[in-house]
Image: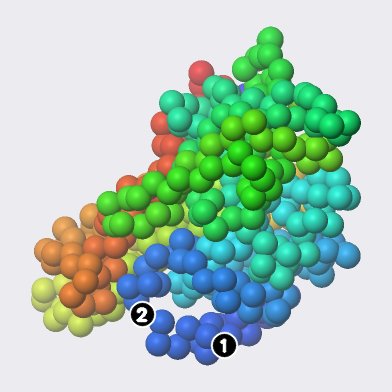
Amino acid sequence: MQPLTFEPCDLPDAAEALRDDVRAFLADELAGYPVSKRAHSWIGFDADFSCKLGARGWLGMTWPAPWGPGRSALERYVVIEELLAAGAPVAAHWIAERQSGQLLLRFGNDEQRALCLPGIVAGETYFCIGMSEPDSGSDLASIRSKAVKTDVKGQSGWVINGRKVWTTYAQNSHYMIALLRTGEAEKSRHEGTTQFLIDLSLPGVGVRPIRNMLGDEEFNEVTFDEVFVPDAMMIGAEGDGWRQVTAELAFERSGPDRFLSAFALLIELVRFVSTLPPEAAAGAYDAVGRLYAHLSTLRALSISVATRLDAGEEPALEASVLKDLGVTFEQSIPEIAQQILGIAPRLDCGSDFESSLAYVQQACVSFSLRGGTTEIMRGVIARGLGLR
């Protein structure tokens, strides 16, 4: 049994000092950027924008020399928070900077770091996550994709076969970090798994976009048919995949992206409610106040987790709790907005509020897929608390 620990923490002055610089940069770069695009939040893809962030030194901020400036995780937190609050198009570099680079720093070898980290810091190298598989969802322990030890023309390596699904922007990514089965699960299903760095341009790799109800192709299915990767592309030690992926998920599940995906809609809701006469807006005021209270609480929890990550800890359970609460919050916003105002969403021809409501209302269905489905998350939490 593991106790939950969310110590109250404040962002230090050095971190807050960045906020004005980031806001000024965003005000200039996103001038005229429509609300309909801001509502896409961290799924908005713009390669040029990612490069501009890299040029400002705002990617890989926490990474030590020679890969980065070695700034604190809380300074990075402020940058991420402002990007998300502005609805900036950060998807190109997002996964690489948020977790893939962090994983390579901790568990990767020198060759992998030299291959990938400079491009990530520059906003030019993109990653996708190879965890979920068809018929297994977020139950990572049930993965079936395999890497088999082999020797090809005198080069020692691994041959990979299998499929990964729900891989965000795999069609635009250069690399995937994939969790694969390399051995038998003897005492535990978590055994026999290993992570690999896979170049997605290799022969035998296929990418098929999965179109959602909005017509977007954010998710993909990636197939591996006799894909050979050399030994140097194995991350960490053989069989350590589960331990490594658990550490990786703490970065994926605990950031402000877990409760700010629908922030553009919340802003438009506040703006709309502020135009209502007081006698017609009492219920709306109450609803907005509750949403603000929930948002403030989630932010406090997230900063607490970020502080522990900055100290080198692994608050995986707390990150899972935050992820579950954040998804519930984000998915409630469009429902509450429509209930209190009775306004129909319009994707193409409505006001800023109507268009952002339409996008978030449809997109939020997928929020519970990212980083682990709700059912799996609650099982992980229950197990961590000793309840099952």
Judge left or right: residue 127 versus residue 86.
right
Q: Residue furthest front?
A: 153
Image quarter where the N terminus lies is: top right
In percent of the image, x 53 and y 63: which residue is there?
Answer: 91
Label drawn at residue 24: 1
Residue 196 figure quarter: top right
Amino acid under label 1? Ala
The spot of residue 44 in percent (x, y) is 46, 66
In percent of the image, x 52 and y 54: which residue is there?
Answer: 171
Q: The residue tagged with tag 2: helix, strand or loop?
A: loop
Amino acid under label 2? Pro
* Category of crowding for the residue at label 2, using alpha-carbon neighbours closer than 10 angstroms: few (below 14), some (14–19), many (at least 20): few
The residue to which callout 2 is attached is 34
Residue 295 figure quarter: bottom left
In percent of the image, x 54 and y 67: which residue is there?
Answer: 90
Answer whether labels 1 and 2 touch (C-beta < 8 Å): no
* Category of crowding for the residue at label 1, using alpha-carbon neighbours closer than 10 angstroms: few (below 14), some (14–19), many (at least 20): few
Label drawn at residue 176: none
**Reading the chain from its start, which is encountered first: label 1 or label 2?**
1
Q: Could one spot residue 335 in this view of the protein?
A: yes
Residue 286 figure quarter: bottom left
